[in-house]
Structures are given as structure tokens and as C-alpha cells.
Image (cartoon, helix red, strand yellow):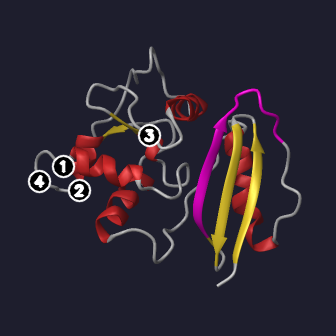
Amino acid sequence: MTTREIELHTPLGLVHLRWREGKPVELHLGPFEPEGHSQPPAQVPAADEKLVTDLCAYFRGEAVDLFFSLPDGIGTPFRRRVWQALIQIPRGRCATYGGLARTLELPPNSARAVGLACGANPLPVLIPCHRVVSATGDLTGFTAGLPWKRALLELEGVPLCNDQVLSFSLV
């Protein structure tokens, strides 16, 4: 199995992307550095060029479709089910942990399990766990930190005030 890695220098900070067998398997958001300078990656294999180009455009604030299919072999069946639901949340919209649990027809009080699945997401941004907030709209939990979550939501045009989403879908 060949694994490839690339670093993207974005206006929000460094992003590391790892591929295996032509599919993204890990995306890591580095330190949040909003004054960072965007620069194109040195060299990208042709097969991966569209995803890298789209990610660079996304981090510049352009409305691009980052849809992709979940790679095989990552995540438990439960996590994959949650991640698939996350992919359905459109850009510029937010859902709640509890709302996702209800959508997935999980037992009552499953919001925490949904949150844990979000926290185990190996491909933030591509699997948009940053679009999930608390029942009150508060920004909570994000593996890269709340500054990244806030910046990604603002980049997508989500209205925020004091780390709270002003309008969100209960999904």
C-alpha cells in the first residue's frame, strides 16, 4: 500500500493530507495561524489534483463541493454511519449532536456517542464535523480546537456571535 502525504499552506494554517491507494485517509489541521499565507503545494499527482485544488479553494473561502465517498477500512460501522450523516450537512448550515442522533434513529441520549464519533473523524473538513454544535448552538469540541471550528464556520458564512451559532438546523 502506497501512502502519500502533502502539506497545504492555507490562509488559516497548515493542513496535512494523507492518501492511501488514491483515497484520502487522514486530514490534520495544524496550528491555527490566521495570518498564514496561502501557497500552492509543490507537486501533486494528477489523480489527486482535483481534491487538492478544491481544498485550496475552500480555504480561500470559495464555495466548492468537497463531496467524496468514505474510504473503505476507516472507522467502525457506527462511526461510518455518523460520518455519512455529517457529509449530508450542507456548507453554511449546522446541526446539533442530538439532532443527528435523532436523524440516525439512535436511542435517546445518544448525542454524546455522536460527539465521540465526530471526535474520531480522521478527515475533518472533508467529513464536516465542524458543522455540528450543541443543542443551544454553542461551539463545542473540535479536535483541532475551537479557533479552527469558528474560522471554518465563518468561512462558510455561518452567522456567529460569542461562539454561538445564531441559526442552525436541528437535522
- Mark 3–mark 4 Cα distance, whole angstroms, equals 22 Å
Instruction: Specify the label residue 131 is tagged with.
Output: 3
Residue identified by numbered label 2: 104
- Mark 1–mark 4 Cα distance, whole angstroms, equals 6 Å
Instruction: Specify the label residue 107 is tagged with.
Output: 4
- Answer whether residue 33 is magenta in the image: yes
Image quadrant containing the N terminus? bottom right
- Answer whether residue 102 is magenta in the image: no
Residue identified by numbered label 1: 110
Label 1: state its secondary structure: loop
Residue 145: x percent and y percent?
Answer: 51, 35
Quick check: marks 1 and 4 in contact, CB under 8 Å? yes
- The answer to whether any part of residue 98 appears in the image is yes
Label 3: state its secondary structure: helix
Q: Main secondary structure of the magenta part?
A: strand
Which is in the foreground here, disc 2 or disc 1? 1
Quick check: marks 3 and 1 in contact, CB under 8 Å? no
Dot 4 crowding, Cα within 10 Å, few <14, some 14–19, many 20+: few
- Mark 3–mark 2 Cα distance, whole angstroms, equals 16 Å
Quick check: marks 2 and 4 in contact, CB under 8 Å? no
Where residue 84 sits, quadrant-wise, is bottom left
Where residue 133 sits, quadrant-wise, is top left
| Image point (47%, 20%), residue name | 160
Residue type at mark 2 is Leu
- Mark 2–mark 1 Cα distance, whole angstroms, equals 10 Å
Q: Which of the two discs, 3 and 2, labels the residue nearer the N terminus?
A: 2
- The answer to whether any part of residue 65 appears in the image is no
Residue type at mark 4 is Pro
